[in-house]
Structures are given as structure tokens and as C-alpha cells.
């Protein structure tokens, strides 16, 4: 399929969005210690690239589902920031009414259909969402985001199969950060195993690249979305990336030694924000003033969101009971 | 076996050919799908020549292969896909030929379907029906016969419906499809061949009810479900000859049975027997007794009792099966002992019942 070249505007949009998400996530990490956000928190710092690259190709009627580490996906897809922060604070005004917390984000107004906390859980659900798009003859598509760990679940292969059988307009969006909590790939996946070959074996077009590389992430995402939208067939994308903080929580845990210094240094030197800056500079635009502007705007957004969250009421147990049945 | 030819399918569509419970389920599919284009029907074997014991006969011809389709053997993914459809404006019905097969999809049932409405703060319900069929007899054995309704009944967010009589099969199935929540709809395989002419169907589905009183009496209350209600109803008829009044309440809605009606009945009879087609440990009968005791402690003349299946799996051998399962006979005998009476010539009476009741299930599955 013929690809349009990536424009300077694309680069700037990508850069602005990753800086915004990084700034939000860092603010959450800083304020987490106040112990007002009483829920497990899987931050996306380091992994902003893939989420933004794919979301830039989508519109509000395209739908997305995600997993426990979903802040970047939710924000990139256009999820409401205030409702996300209120959800972390367990307030009635949260995007899930305080019932779900950080691991259960939803904003149906922008097509973010939900993130759930069991690895692999939303993969087949996304197939159903995609099937609904097929049955109602829309031009929209569905993206399901998950980590490389979810490809170890049986339901991943089950869903590849049905997506191929039914020609679903579905993108399997794999972010490979190399770790399941502290477990590296070696005890989990054979070095001869390639995720893209698994999907290819199901007859699914599969693309792989580095999610921290702005050109690669954008080009692959764009190619995949155009393909799925036009051909009405599934596609799989695997983007490598790296999580900077601990699996769950606001801290850096590199001192406990489950990742080598060499590996950490490589990824820190291959940070998506620095990479994007370099790329923009090469196009003759100075990224520093843009970065500063985005950071300042985002800081204002964050302050608002936190203020609103702390003022919002807590849900009562009676309200919780009313959510048992529709 | 329910191989339908083209003519009989046409008749079924027109609701002219309903002979049994299985036809009633097929008719309920037809009527739901005809009036609601968002209803979808799928499951392994849904469109094969046997159409899930005839319960999905003719659907694909009538509604096309986008709405009615066979699936890969991927229970977990199929359940997830059904959930995805349900949160996108469709009303899927997923069928498992055996309840046991659904165990491969517990993550989707418990962590997704049951929780979705709750964990996203009441924004999006999951109007989904999962049909599960419980096998019995002809050596179904340990993993083709499990009656695990208590498992599902303990999960908030799920509704669990177990119809007993064909009319209820039709009506409750339509109500389950119309319900905005995930409903586990459990059919005992033997019910499929129960005769019925289609009388008593509602035109448009009502809200799911709680319980039906199927026999009235003032000596003992039986609370039962599924095939247990059929046996209990038979027992009540047999014991009429002995002037024993058995009140049978078919508590088909397992998480939401009508405790007020049950309590009222127990207040009248002073005796309670639960008949539950599942392992006895943590059974629905156990829950019913736990709820009745504080309400009716003073009126109870004797301790409540339970009839249920043993707390070990059923072996395949025919010789084991016949001792493992209960029937109408066991219910009559239990009532005899609970009332501390002797029914004269009851054995002859039961022998006659046994030979007059329908041919027993003769497989293959």
C-alpha cells in the first residue's frame, strides 16, 4: 500500500502528545506519595511512543481497548484527564465512578471502550467490538493494546484465529517492553519465538518496529491503520519499548537488579522524547520552545484535574450496590 | 435427535410445529431474532446438521450466517467476543453443548461479563446470554455432566436461570435475551425431549421473574429448580393419592429466588425440602435453607432437608450412574421419612410411575 510521507505537522503532533503524557505521568508519580490515590498504578513513562503513534491514526469513532498499563492509551485516544485523575482519587466523578481505579479506565465519548486488569482479558472483547463494526458496515476499526506478556495467554492465539476467520477490522497492538513485572523474556518465551510469526501463521499481516523511534512508530501505525480500514482485515503491530519505573508504583526500582545497567542505559539513550526532539531538529524546527509550551499548558491541566479530584465526593456503598445490575 | 426438514423448519418459524422443550428454545430464538435484529446466535455446532439438539434448527437459513454461526473451539475467545458485541449494541447468545466446556471461559465470564457494568461505574451493561447444557446418563462421566450453577450464582453481576418446564424454557429464554445483564441460562439435557405443544408463550418477553409455584399443598414445601422441579411436581401428583399436600416452588432464578413466597409457604407447611440438581456442598438448596431458617424458625416442625447430588463426580459406568442420581422416587421416599409416615403400596405406585414415564435417555449425548 502506498504510504504518504510523514509531515512536520505529524512530528510536532507526536512530540506534543508524548510530552503531555510524560508530564502527566510524572506529576502522578510525584503526587502518589501523598497517598491520596489509593490504587495500584502502572505508569506509562517511557512507553508513550506507541500509544501516541497509533492514536494519531484514529478518529473518535474508532475504538480502543487496553490493559492494566493504559494511561498513555487512554490519554492518547482523547480520554478526559479530569475524570482519569478523579478515578485515581476514588471519587464519584471518576471515569468509572470510583469503582475501577487506574486499571479500569473508560471514556466512551472518545472510543476508549475500557481497560481491564487481567492480562489478555480485553483481546477477545476487542474482537467482538470489531465484529460489531463489521456487522453494522461502518468504516471504523478497533485497536486492542497489550504487552508481549499477553501473547503468552491462550486467548491471544484464539483471538488471532477468529479475527482471521471473520476478517475483523482489528489491530492487535503489542508493546514489547521485555518484562512481565520482574520476569524477563527468557523464562517466558523461546528465543526462537517471534510474535509476528505467530500472527502471520494465522494469515494476519504483521509489522514490527521500535516504538521509541518516531519515524518507525508513525510509519508502521499509519500503514496498519490504512490497511485495516481499507481491506477490512486484521493486522498485528509489535513495537519495542521500555518502561522506566517499577512495574506498579511511582518509583524507580533499577537498584534491585532485575535489569542490567547496559540495557537500562541503552533505552535511556533511546528515549522517545529525545528521539523525537532529534528528528524535529533535523527538520529545522527547534523543539525546546514547543516542549516548554506543552509542559506549561499540561501543568495547568494537571493542577486543575487534581484540584477537581480532591474536591469531588466519594462514592457511597449504596451507589456501589446499584452498579451490580443494569 | 431433531433433524428438521425444510417443511418442518418453516412450520417451526410460524410457531406451528412445537413438540417439545427443544423446539420451544428454537422458537424462542426465532421470535427473539425476528423482532430484534441485534440478537445474534453462535456456538460450536450451532449450524451443524444437529443444531445443538435441535434447539437452533433452521436459524441460519432464516437469519443468515452473519447472525447465526458456528465457531472455532475457543470458548474463552468466543465469550470475550460475545462481550465485545454486547458492549457494542448487540445481544449475543452463546451456546455450549455442555456446561463443562464453559469452564475454559471463566476469565471472560467472571472478570469481564459479570464485572463490566460494575467496574466502569454503571456506564455500559452487557446484554449477553450464555446457554449451558448439563448432561446426564449414557456414561457422560465426570466432565460431561457437571451441574455448577452454584458457582455462577455466587458471582455478582451474573443472573442464573434454570428453567424446568417447556413453557418456562421458551418464556424465560426470551426474557433472558431481553435482559440487559449477562444471563447464564442452564438447560438439563433431558428436559429437551419433554413434550409441549407451544401453549402459554408470551407474545413479548416480560422481565425475568423469580419463582413459580407449580403445585400447592399444606404438608411440605419443596423448593427446586430445573429437572428437580419436574421430579418434584411428579412426586406431588403421586402423593396426592395419599392425601399429602406437597407445595412445589420452582425457584428458576437462582440468584434472585422469591424468598418471600418460599417463606410464606414454609410458614404454612412447617416443613422444607430442597431439591437441587448439583453437588450438595454449597448448593443453592443450602442457601435457601440458610435464608429460610431465621425467617421461619418458629414455624418449622422438623429440620429442613436437602436432596442433591453426592459430593463426588459421577463415574461413567451405568451401574454407578443409577445410584448417583436422584429421581421422583427418591423425593417420595424422602417425604415419607420427613413426615414420619408409611405410604402403603408406594413401591407399586412408583413402579407404575416409572414404567409410564417417558423412555429414559439413551444417548449418545
Image (cartoon, coloured by chain):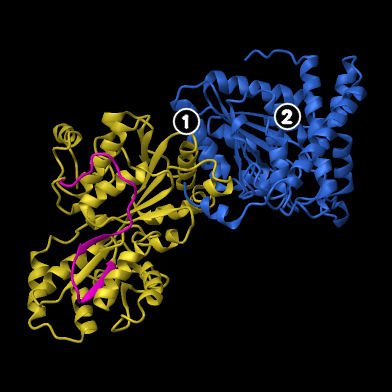
Chain colours: A blue, B yellow
* Mark-to-mark CA distance, 1 and 2: 25 Å
Q: Which residue does the image show at 26% across and 50% down from the upper left? A: B169
Front-most of A3 and A57?
A57
Task: Please state the horizontal and vertical placement of residue A130, each as a whole percent of the image.
Answer: 51, 31
Determine crowd level at label 2: few under 14, some 14-19, many 20+ residues with C-alpha closer than 10 A: many
Task: Please state the horizontal and vertical placement of residue B313, each as a whole percent of the image.
Answer: 37, 69
Which numbered tag is attached to residue B223? none
Determine crowd level at label 1: few under 14, some 14-19, many 20+ residues with C-alpha closer than 10 A: many
Task: Please state the horizontal and vertical placement of residue A188, each as a whole percent of the image.
Answer: 67, 51
Judge whether residue B157 is colored magenta: no
Secondary structure category for the residue under label 1: helix
Q: How many marks?
A: 2
Stretch in magenta: B199-223
Task: Please state the horizontal and vertical placement of residue A312, each as a whole percent of the image.
Answer: 71, 46
Q: Quadrant of residue B206?
A: top left
Q: Which residue does the image show at 85% across and 43% down from the upper left? A: A263
Q: Which residue does the image show at 58% across and 26% down from the upper left? A: A62
Q: Quadrant of residue A12?
A: top right
Quarter of the image that includes the C terminus of chain B: bottom left
The reply to whether residue B233 is in sight is yes
In this rendering, is residue B344 above or below A325?
Answer: below
Q: Is residue A111 left or right of residue A69?
A: left
Q: According to the image, label 1 marks what residue?
A: A132
Judge whether residue B207 is colored magenta: yes
Q: Which SS does the magenta portion mostly show?
A: loop
The reply to whether residue B50 is in sight is no
Front-most of B290 and B218?
B218
What is the chain letter for disc 2?
A
Q: Is residue A263 left or right of residue B296?
A: right
Amino acid at each position: 500500500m502506498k504510504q504518504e510521507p510523514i509531515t512536520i505537522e505529524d512530528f510536532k503532533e507526536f512530540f506534543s502528545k508524548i510530552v503531555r503524557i510524560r508530564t502527566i505521568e510524572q506529576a502522578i508519580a510525584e503526587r502518589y506519595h501523598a497517598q491520596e490515590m489509593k490504587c495500584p498504578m502502572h505508569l506509562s513513562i517511557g512507553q508513550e511512543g506507541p500509544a501516541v503513534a497509533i492514536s494519531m491514526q484514529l478518529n473518535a469513532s474508532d475504538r480502543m481497548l487496553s490493559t492494566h498499563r493504559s494511561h498513555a492509551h487512554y490519554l492518547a485516544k482523547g480520554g478526559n484527564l479530569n475524570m482519569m485523575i478523579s478515578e485515581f482519587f476514588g471519587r464519584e466523578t471518576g471515569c468509572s465512578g470510583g469503582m475501577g481505579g487506574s486499571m479500569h479506565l473508560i471514556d466512551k465519548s472518545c472510543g476508549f471502550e475500557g481497560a481491564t486488569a487481567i492480562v489478555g482479558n480485553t483481546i477477545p472483547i476487542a474482537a467482538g467490538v470489531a465484529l460489531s463494526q463489521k456487522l453494522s458496515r461502518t468504516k471504523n476499526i478497533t485497536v486492542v493494546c497489550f504487552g508481549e506478556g499477553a501473547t503468552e495467554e491462550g486467548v491471544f492465539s484464539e483471538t488471532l484465529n477468529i479475527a482471521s476467520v471473520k476478517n475483523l477490522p482489528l489491530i492487535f497492538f503489542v508493546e514489547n517492553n521485555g518484562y512481565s513485572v520482574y520476569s524477563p523474556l527468557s523464562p517466558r518465551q523461546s528465543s526462537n519465538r517471534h510474535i509476528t510469526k505467530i500472527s502471520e501463521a494465522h494469515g494476519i499481516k504483521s509489522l514490527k518496529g521500535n516504538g521509541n523511534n518516531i519515524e518507525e512508530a508513525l510509519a508502521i501505525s499509519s500503514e496498519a491503520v490504512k490497511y485495516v480500514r481499507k481491506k477490512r482485515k486484521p493486522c498485528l503491530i509489535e513495537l519495542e519499548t521500555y518502561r522506566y519505573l517499577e512495574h506498579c508504583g511511582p518509583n524507580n526500582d533499577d537498584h534491585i537488579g532485575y535489569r542490567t545497567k547496559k540495557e537500562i542505559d541503552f533505552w535511556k539513550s533511546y528515549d522517545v522524547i529525545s528521539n523525537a526532539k532529534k528528528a524535529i531538529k533535523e527538520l529545522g524546527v527547534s523543539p525546546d520552545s514547543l516542549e516548554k509550551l506543552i509542559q506549561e499548558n499540561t501543568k495547568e491541566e494537571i493542577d486543575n484535574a487534581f484540584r477537581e479530584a480532591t474536591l469531588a465526593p466519594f462514592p457511597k456503598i449504596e451507589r456501589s450496590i446499584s452498579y451490580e445490575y443494569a | 435427535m431433531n433433524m428438521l426438514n425444510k417443511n418442518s423448519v418453516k412450520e417451526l418459524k410460524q410457531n406451528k410445529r412445537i413438540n417439545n422443550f427443544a423446539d420451544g428454545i428454537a422458537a424462542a430464538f426465532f421470535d427473539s431474532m425476528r423482532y430484534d435484529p441485534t440478537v445474534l446466535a453462535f456456538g460450536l455446532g450451532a449450524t451443524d446438521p444437529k443444531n445443538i439438539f435441535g434447539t437452533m434448527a433452521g436459524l441460519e437459513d432464516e437469519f443468515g450466517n452473519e447472525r447465526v454461526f458456528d465457531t472455532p473451539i475457543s470458548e474463552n475467545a468466543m465469550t470475550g467476543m460475545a462481550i465485545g458485541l454486547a458492549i457494542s449494541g448487540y445481544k449475543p447468545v452463546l451456546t455450549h453443548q455442555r456446561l463443562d466446556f464453559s469452564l475454559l471461559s471463566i476469565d471472560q465470564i467472571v472478570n469481564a461479563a459479570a464485572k463490566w457494568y460494575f467496574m466502569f461505574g454503571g456506564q455500559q451493561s452487557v446484554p449477553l446470554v450464555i446457554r449451558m447444557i448439563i448432561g446426564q446418563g449414557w456414561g457422560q462421566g465426570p466432565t460431561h455432566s457437571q451441574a455448577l450453577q452454584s458457582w455462577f450464582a455466587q458471582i455478582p453481576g451474573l443472573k442464573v436461570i434454570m428453567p424446568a418446564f417447556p413453557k418456562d424454557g421458551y418464556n424465560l429464554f426470551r426474557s433472558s435475551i431481553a435482559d440487559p445483564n449477562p444471563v447464564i441460562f442452564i438447560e438439563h439435557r433431558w428436559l429437551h425431549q419433554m413434550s409441549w405443544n407451544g401453549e402459554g408463550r408470551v407474545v413479548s418477553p416480560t422481565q425475568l421473574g423469580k419463582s413459580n409455584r407449580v403445585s400447592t399443598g399444606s404438608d411440605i414445601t419443596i423448593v427446586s429448580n430445573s429437572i428437580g422441579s419436574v421430579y418434584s411436581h411428579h412426586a406431588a401428583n403421586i402423593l396426592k393419592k395419599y392425601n399429602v399436600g406437597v407445595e412445589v416452588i420452582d425457584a428458576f432464578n437462582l440468584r434472585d429466588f422469591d424468598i418471600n413466597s418460599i417463606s410464606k409457604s414454609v410458614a404454612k407447611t412447617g416443613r422444607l425440602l430442597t431439591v437441587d440438581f448439583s453437588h450438595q456442598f454449597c448448593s443453592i438448596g443450602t442457601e435457601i435453607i440458610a435464608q429460610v431458617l431465621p425467617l421461619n424458625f418458629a414455624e418449622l416442625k422438623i429440620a429442613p432437608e436437602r436432596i442433591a447430588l453426592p459430593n463426588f463426580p459421577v463415574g461413567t459406568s451405568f451401574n454407578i450412574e443409577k445410584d448417583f442420581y436422584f429421581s421422583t422416587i427418591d423425593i417420595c421416599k424422602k417425604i415419607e421419612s420427613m413426615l414420619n409416615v408409611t405410604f402403603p403400596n408406594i413401591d407399586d405406585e412408583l413402579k407404575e410411575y416409572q414404567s409410564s414415564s417417558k423412555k429414559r435417555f439413551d444417548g449418545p449425548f
